[in-house]
Amino acid sequence: RAAALAAEQRRLGVDLGLRGRVLVAPEGINGTVQGSAAAVSAYEASVEAALCAATGSSSSLGGGVAVDWKRSAAGTDEAIFPDFAVKEVPELVGFGLHGRQVAGGRQIEPLDVKAEAGTRLSPEEFHRLLGETPREDLRLVDVRNTFEYEVGHFDGALDPGMTHTAQWPRFVDSRLEDLRGKRVMLYCTGGIRCEKASAYLNRRLRETDTTTAADVGGDSAGSRQTTAIAAAEFAEGSAGGVFQLEGGIHRYLEAFPDGGRFRGANFVFDRRAQMRPEAATENSAA
């Protein structure tokens, strides 16, 4: 499946005259493309159709294939990428867990994002909980690398001191007891790194929980609520939990054009280097 999707991506890049960077893995597609408004729209439609065909769905909306498209202004008529490159990878976000073993020689199971990831919060819910959670109960963590954090971050956010995403497990394992029982709120650029980051954190909290039997495989779909009701339950109670900003900083800046609780700029991996709050709201062809 991944090889076929990668081949289709390369064809689309040529046919539509796109520039950008795209990663293709067995779990899906992630990337950024630049082109005319018509070309980008055609690209979105083609990707959704290809994913629906790959999963046997009749509709990207009704069949369970959800693509979180984010548009922003290129800010220039010049290309923000030198070409269009597609790369096949084992994981869209790699934590270096493949092949690693735990005590007894057992290999670490791949993260199951659907079962193990944290509770998704809309930008509005994320903003509200940041304001309502007592400081001593809150752990706001930036899942990005330090150089991204330095360009811009949320007020009071913790920088894990990473130079590569693969260092996230080391950070989590060194801070487990500080995070346990707290309201842990994670954020990243567009949301994808938080999917894996929250899943790993939840797994490690369960594996090291001495009060209950560990459930390494995760809960049912109930562990992954996306509604405001779930967020409200945590807000009203004293229990901790692992939350993630749905759509990342990009979606937050769309919802709060003045920056809200975010200070600075959102680092992006192209020639723009950073995106200011107002740029996130522009519906342009990048």
Image: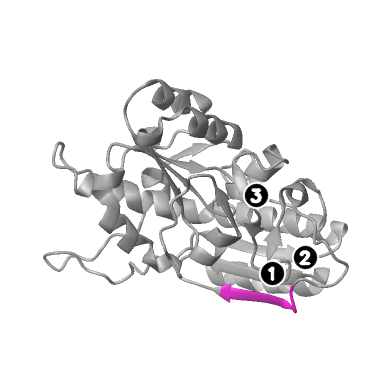
Q: Which residue matches tag 1? A: 270
How far apart in space, not on screen, are marks 1 and 3 (Cα)?
A: 15 Å
Please state if 185 lies on the left or on the right of 17 as rendered.
Answer: left
* Magenta stretch in the rendered image: 81-87
Identify residue type, mark 3.
His
How far apart in space, not on screen, are marks 3 and 2 (Cα)?
A: 17 Å
* Camera-side residue of 181 and 194: 181
Q: Please say if 71 is above or below 33.
A: above
Q: Which residue matches tag 2? A: 34
- Residue at image coords 68%, 38%: 256
Q: Residues within 10 Å of mark 1 (few under 14, many from 20)?
A: some
Mark 3 / mark 2, whichever is N-terminal: 2
The image position of residue 46, as x and y in percent, is 73, 58
Identify residue type, mark 1.
Asp
Please state if 31 lies on the left or on the right of 95 as rendered.
Answer: right
Q: Residues within 10 Å of mark 2 (few under 14, many from 20)?
A: many
Q: Secondary structure at mark 1?
A: loop
Residues at badges 1 and 3 in contact (C-beta under 8 Å)? no
Q: Which residue matches tag 3? A: 250
Residue 124, label in figure: none
The image position of residue 5, as x and y in percent, is 61, 67
